[in-house]
Amino acid sequence: MRPRVPWMNEVDTAILEYFAELGAVDGSRVSLAPTPLYVNLVQRMGVVDVQPNTLSRRMSRLAAMGFLEKIDEKRGYYCLTEMGEAFLAGELDAEDIPRPEDN
C-alpha cells in the first residue's frame, strides 16, 4: 500500500503511473516532456482535467522531490526514478518521502 503524501494529489499519481506504464526500452526508462504527457493524460485518455502549465508544474515538483528525473534541461524531458517506482510499488515508508520544505 502506498503511503499518504500530503503534498501529492491525483495529478501527481496519474503522472507517475503513466510513466510506470511506459516502462523502459532496452533498460532505459522512457522519457517525456510535459506536452506529450498532457496530450495523452488529458486530451486523449481523460485521466485528469488540468491545464498544460499545471501538469508541467507538477512534473517539476515531482522531480524536485525525487520521483522523476529531469534528463534534458533544455527541452524539459523527465523519466521515472527508482524512488518513483518504489513509491508506486508501496515500498516506501512515509518517513522516506521528502517534504517540500526539505528541498
Image (spheres, rainbow, N blue to C red):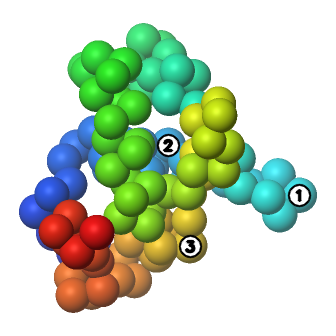
Residues under numbered marks 3 and 2 in contact, where contact means CB atoms less than 8 Å apart: no
Crowdedness near tag 2: few (<14), some (14–19) or many (≥20) residues, C-alpha within 10 Å: some
The residue closer to the viewer here, 26 or 101, is 101
User: In the picture shown, does residue 12 fall above or below 40?
Assistant: below
Which one is in front in this view, the residue at disc 1 or the one at disc 3?
3
User: In the picture shown, does residue 97 fall above or below 93?
Assistant: above
What is the number of the mark on residue 18? 2
Task: Look at the image and tell me whether residue 35 can be seen.
Answer: yes
- Closer to the chain start, of discs 2 and 1, is 2
Residue type, numbered disc 3: Glu
* Position in image of residue 56 (x %, y %): 39, 32
What is the number of the mark on residue 82? 3
The residue at 20%/64% (across/down) is: 100
Residue type, numbered disc 1: Asp
Q: List the single residue furthest toward the top.
A: 43
In the displayed structure, does residue 26 sit left or right of residue 65? right
> In the rendered image, which quarter is residue 77 located in?
top right
**Is the C terminus in the top left, top right, bottom left or bottom right quadrant?**
bottom left
**Mark 1 to mark 3 CA distance (whole Å):** 16 Å
The residue at 36%/76% (across/down) is: 90
In the displayed structure, does residue 87 sit left or right of residue 19? left
Residues under numbered marks 1 and 3 in contact, where contact means CB atoms less than 8 Å apart: no
In the displayed structure, does residue 101 sit left or right of residue 80? left
